[in-house]
Image (tube, rainbow, N blue to C red):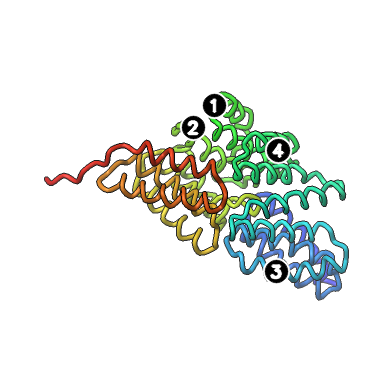
Amino acid sequence: HDDAVRGFVLGEECCAKQASMRVADVVRTGQLGATLMLAAGDPWGAATALGFVAINLVQLGRFDESRVVGEQLASLAERLGNHAALCLHDRARGMREFFRTGGVDALEVFAHADLELVERLGWLWGGHSFSWIGLAHLLRGDWNTAGHWLERGSQHAPPGLAGFSWGSWFQFLALTEQRDRALAFIDERQAELPIAGQPNTWTAWTLLMAFTEGLYILGEYERPASWYSLIREAEATGAVTTSYIEGRLLERIAGISAAAAGDWSSAETHFRNALRQADELPHRFEALETHRFYAQMLTDRNGPGDIDRAAQLLRHAAQGYSQLKMPRHASLADQMLAHLPPARERTLD
């Protein structure tokens, strides 16, 4: 009886910690709670807890462990008809597959399947589905269709879990150079951003990362530079990606923030770490994004050898985007390559 109660409490604690992006704690409490609930004859609660464990293992960059946990929870959830646990399993699996392959077509198929499920069950998670569909169109290069879905996702962002949908819409505004709309959107959501030194919601952290990247794209460096310590605070949770939903590498965002501040040494360290993580996870799209933003940092620094290295990174990014059938992202890299400044020569003292 005591184990049953303790398992239930740990399962509830797991859900509560999920809301504030305490990812390592979610995994620890969720796994222990699931073990106790299974022993006490509560497979339903165990499956739900394991669903949160599976998605947070993705955020911790432990993809293989997430897959193993997912297989365990799927066998429980399918037998019981626990649709919430199954949805979390499918989402973790769908995004792990996208991170591994960069396959846009499979991402869109997954997103439509997710939308069908949440709408059939009457859940308010459809905003995530809309945003995933929009992301697929964005990467495929159909930015008009992407804008439709991403705006719809933002307008129907799930309560308490809105960061991905809001952040994806903002990133679209930045990529399409809708500066006034993008800056107005930040002003509207300013109060949602995290506060240093206190627990913050998953939405707050996700928005911070999206705003850092988007403002940097727009050439607005002041606020991204000021958020460096906050981004490092997010990394202290153990998170490697912003979430299982979008997978933006925190090391890449830390690199962008440091670059915006002109802290070239820290920025380079973060970008190199991001490249290593993207290779190890693997996360094919983030590897290409890191090449592109690392190249921008090197271009801004323009030290000896930087422009040659930036050109190398951009050629790699353009080729990779093309292989993944992301033509407009390939074009972004090509345009940066075409507009690189002359390389500075090393001078002798």
Number of other residues with Cα within 10 Å of mark 2, as a class: few under 14, some 14 to 19, many 20 or more = some
Q: Residue at x 88, y 63 (%)?
A: 81
Residue 5, horizontal then vertical, whole percent: 82, 66
User: Could you say which disc has been placed on residue 149 in the image?
Assistant: 4
Residue 93, horizontal then vertical, whole percent: 69, 61
User: Could you say which disc has been placed on residue 69 in the image?
Assistant: 3
Residue at mark 2 to residue at mark 1: CA–CA distance: 7 Å
Say which label, 2 or 4, has the lower sequence index: 4
Q: Mark 2 belongs to which amino acid?
A: Leu
Q: Secondary structure at mark 4?
A: helix
Say which label, 3 or 4, has the lower sequence index: 3
Q: Is residue 210 visible?
A: yes
Q: Residue at x 56, y 46 (%)?
A: 326
Q: Is residue 50 above or below residue 262?
A: below
Q: Secondary structure at mark 2?
A: loop
Number of other residues with Cα within 10 Å of mark 3, as a class: few under 14, some 14 to 19, many 20 or more = many
Q: Are marks 2 and 1 in contact (CB under 8 Å)?
A: yes
219 with respect to 145 (left or right): left
Q: Mark 3 belongs to which amino acid?
A: Val
Which quadrant of the structure image shows residue 180?
Answer: top right
Residue at mark 2 to residue at mark 4: CA–CA distance: 22 Å
Tag nearer the camera, 3 or 1: 1
Say which label, 2 or 3, has the lower sequence index: 3
Residue 6, horizontal then vertical, whole percent: 78, 67
Q: Residue at x 30, y 41 (%)?
A: 302
Residue at mark 4 to residue at mark 1: CA–CA distance: 19 Å
